[in-house]
Image (tube, rainbow, N blue to C red):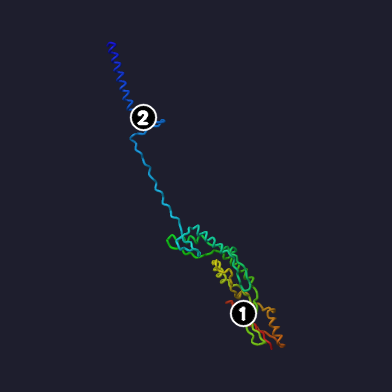
Amino acid sequence: MNNMQRQRLSALLALCLGLFLGACSTTSQTPSVAGQPAPSALASPTTAPTATPPPTPTPFAFTAGSRVAGLDVGGMDEAAAAAQLAELEQQLMLPLELEAGTVITTLRPLDIGLTLPIDSLLAEARQASETGAAARVALQVDYDTHALQARLDSFAAQLARTTPLNLLTETDTFSRSFVYTPALTINMEQAVQVIERRLASPLAARRVTLELVSDPDRAPEPVPLAQIQPQIEAMAALWDGIVGGVCVRSGDRRDNQLQCGYGLFGC
């Protein structure tokens, strides 16, 4: 092979090599940006599932027309109703005046631990409202029964006194008749009932009159002379003879009706 042939062969090989390298360049992939691999042409986008939000709960409100402790709470939530009941509780804290005979004493609700059970009242009303019915919850109060009894016992001790004589008849100038009921005390059963009702009645009068009965545990005491003396002197001024007297007891101590009848007469 002469030089001419060798040059032609070299030129032909160079041409083939250039065509081969050019073909490889057109089929190569585009290099990635910042060192990251290029996205595949076969990948398809994936849509993330959308979460369904939970349903928003409806705020609780008492059924229209609901009443708790006499207050209209229809349409209110529990916080608003509790605020109304708290104001009512303050009204219940006004003191009571207890009157028995001529003696009066003061009873402060705080002294017997009076409270308005707000939580239990609202719980009862909510139970009714959740059924769609209008709640009707009466006013109720809590208090220390032992503390109330102690206050009444103390008050009764002030009443351990002798009642004045009551003139019943005056048949003529020279006679007098009286009824004397000794050893009065408070009717405890009646007192507890009437006080409890008044404690739960914020709009009622704050004075409570208690019933007095004869004390079955105390023996009748003699009538003090100071109570009879004015009648003796009145009769003596009209009659210069002898003034006498008689006492007759009647009734049964078991029914708290023991009484003594006293009579004065002149002869």
The residue singled out by tag 2 in the image is 30
Indicate left or right for 82 with 176 as reference.
left
Quarter containing the N terminus: top left
Q: CA distance from mark 1 to mark 2?
A: 126 Å
Going 30% across and 19% down the picture, which residue do you hit? 15
Q: Quadrant of residue 63?
A: bottom left
The residue singled out by tag 1 in the image is 259
Helix, strand or loop at mark 2: loop
Indicate left or right for 9 with 72 as reference.
left
Residue 149 point in image, percent of width and height: 59, 67
Quarter containing the C terminus: bottom right
Residue 163 point in image, percent of width and height: 64, 76
Indicate left or right for 21 with 34 as reference.
left
Residue 190 point in image, percent of width and height: 56, 72
Helix, strand or loop at mark 1: strand
From the image, state whether disc 1 or disc 2 is nearer to you.
2
The residue type indicated by label 2 comes to Thr
Label tally: 2
Residue 265 point in image, percent of width and height: 67, 86
Q: Which of 44/150 is in front?
A: 44
Q: Residues within 10 Å of mark 2 (few under 14, many from 20)?
A: few
Residue 134 tag number: none
Q: Which of 11/190 is in front?
A: 11
Q: Would you place residue 201 above or below residue 232 in this image?
A: above
Q: Which of 113/223 is in front?
A: 113
Q: Which of 113/116 is in front?
A: 116
Going 41% across and 49% down the picture, which residue do you hit? 53
Q: Quadrant of residue 130?
A: bottom left
Q: Residues within 10 Å of mark 1 (few under 14, many from 20)?
A: some
The residue type indicated by label 1 comes to Gln
Sooner in the amino-acid sequence: mark 1 or mark 2: 2
